[in-house]
Amino acid sequence: MKFATIALFVGIGLFAFGTFWQAVAPWLSLKNIPMESMEKIAEKIPPEFYMLAGDYPDEFKKYFGKPDKTSFIEALKTGKEVYIAEACWHCHSQFVRPVANEEMRYGKVSYPSEYQNAMQLPQLLGTRRVGPDLIRESGVHSNDWHMAHFKNPPEVTPGSVMPKYTWFYDKNGRPNKKGLSVVTYMQWLGSWAKEPMYKLSMK
């Protein structure tokens, strides 16, 4: 048998093997874990969302009305769209890996059901960490911290290379719809975890 023929069969075999382990095997392991809908997600609104409405009442009312399930879903979807559009996923992953003592910093290693909801499609696992992992960001920082951080990162995190996101604010320095939404998304990430990240980190 010629080398080219052998190489062809080996290539096809490796492709089939890779397809199984990269596509079929994950589907088989996750098919019995229910996928949470947006309506189900909105049943567990983080308290920080209500705090946003209280801290920025005029802006919140202008863009979202009152803090309820409907406005939470809108803010959450918009927040993820902003997160993707601004390429936050380039520098921040959403996956605690089982290497390099990541559990010490971010909490327990990420688990499959953590990603079984409508907001995790597509998953933003990331490939590098210029900034910290964000999968358990909920409640780690206050809304005010996030607002100040997006406006001028080095002011709250000295040495940060993160750019300023001044377009998240109006001419008076108050958050606009993008600003409120991306903070809502930040404060949602990991809110489904049984324990806050800071408690896990201190164990």
Image (cartoon, rainbow, N blue to C red):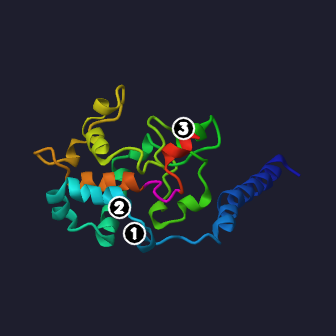
Disc 1 target residue: 42
Residue at (31%, 72%) from the top-left corner? 70
Residue 4 percent across, percent down from the top left: 79, 49
Q: Residue 55: x, y in percent? A: 21, 53
Looking at the rendering, the stretch of residues picked out in magenta corresponds to 189-193
Left or right relative to 142: residue 99:
right
Identify which amino acid the numbered label 3 is placed on: Arg
Type of the residue with mark 2 = Leu
User: In screen coordinates, is 203 left or right of 9?
Assistant: left
Are circles 2 and 1 on residues that touch, CB within 8 Å?
A: yes
The amino acid marked with disc number 1 is: Ala
Residue sticking out furthest to the left = 172
- Rendered location of residue 29, percent (x, y): 68, 65
Query: Which residue occupies 30% across, 48% down?
Result: 143
Q: Give the residue at mark 3.
A: 105
Q: Which residue is mark 2?
A: 76
